Image (cartoon, grey):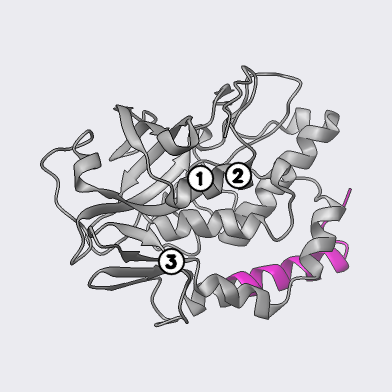
Amino acid sequence: MAQVFDPTANLPLPPTKLLELLWNDNFEIARVDAAGGGTTGAKKLSLVFHENHFSVDVKWKAAPAGGEGWNNSPRREVGAYAVQELFLDPEDYPVPPVVARGISLDAYAAVDKDTAPNIPETRCVFGGMAAWLQNVAQPDPAFDPKRFSEDARYAFHFANLNLLAYLIAHRDARSNNFPMPTDPSTPRVFSIDNGIAFGGVLYNFFTWHFDAIRIGGLPKQSIDRLRRVSRQQLSKFGVLGELAADHAGVLRAVAPSPNCDPEVGTRVVPGRIQFGLTVSEIDAMATRLHDLLARIDAKELQLF
């Protein structure tokens, strides 16, 4: 793959192509920096994919032992990416490409040479890896009501962000979690930290979040797509991915097997990890979608 640099782009590749690269291709960690923004334990890694002749920056966060914590949950990050696919086209995704994968201990020495595996019977570190956005800045406040009423494209993107945040029960509404392009002609809005979602118990109780619809209207085309979503489609989020240790003990993405425990989000057995949403999280999302459509049909919420 020939790398073409666009000095104005927010991602180095279209989301679907970048996602495929991050899931399983081999890379070298060329540089490690602090991620900034108060993201405890997160690092900015510069990766070089030699086989593809491609380099990319990512945000990396090693998972706690067992595969997740209250504000460090690769499965929830991957879940947020998956939910937006229900009603948006890739060029409108607010969540950048994000995967859960293992990094071999040899490669991980660039980050921490004294680290140990966090999944039993592996020789790697498991965690969440998200594409690093380029040419973005942090708005303050996160939502601009005046611009929403005057700029139709901004209204479209922010309404879709709020719609996604509502569906996934996003509860981490700090401004630095919703960057925007520095190019004022591109009114996109991104969501880069979705670890507190899908009904997490712990979050900031002292501020409002976008887990409620807080804007003056929703895009009709997005709602039309959501009307076609069945409970069976939502059930597929029970398994968002599965990784198994290869001959070197490194977790690699494999074809998912049937859900081995619908009541648990991260399912770990020695040398293997399966992750997805729990049945209660899926039920809650289905209820939120049902209630949203009922409010729209009752004319409590407007469409544009």
User: As drawn, is 128 to the left or to the right of 220?
Assistant: left
Q: Residue at x 53, y 33 (%)?
A: 175
> What residue does disc 3 label?
254
Q: CA distance from mark 3 to mark 1?
A: 15 Å
> What residue does disc 2 label?
17
Q: Residue at x 37, y 54 (%)?
A: 101
**Circles 1 and 2 in contact, beta carbons < 8 Å:** yes
Span shown in magenta: 285-304
Asked whether 293 falls inside the magenta stretch, the response is yes
User: As drawn, is 50 to the left or to the right of 236?
Assistant: left
Going by the numbered disc 2, the residue's amino acid type is Lys
Going by the numbered disc 3, the residue's amino acid type is Val
The tally of labels here is 3
Q: Secondary structure at mark 3?
A: loop
Q: Dot 2: within a 10 Å radius of its alpha carbon, few (fewer than 14), some, or many (20 or more) residues?
A: few
> What residue does disc 1 label?
21
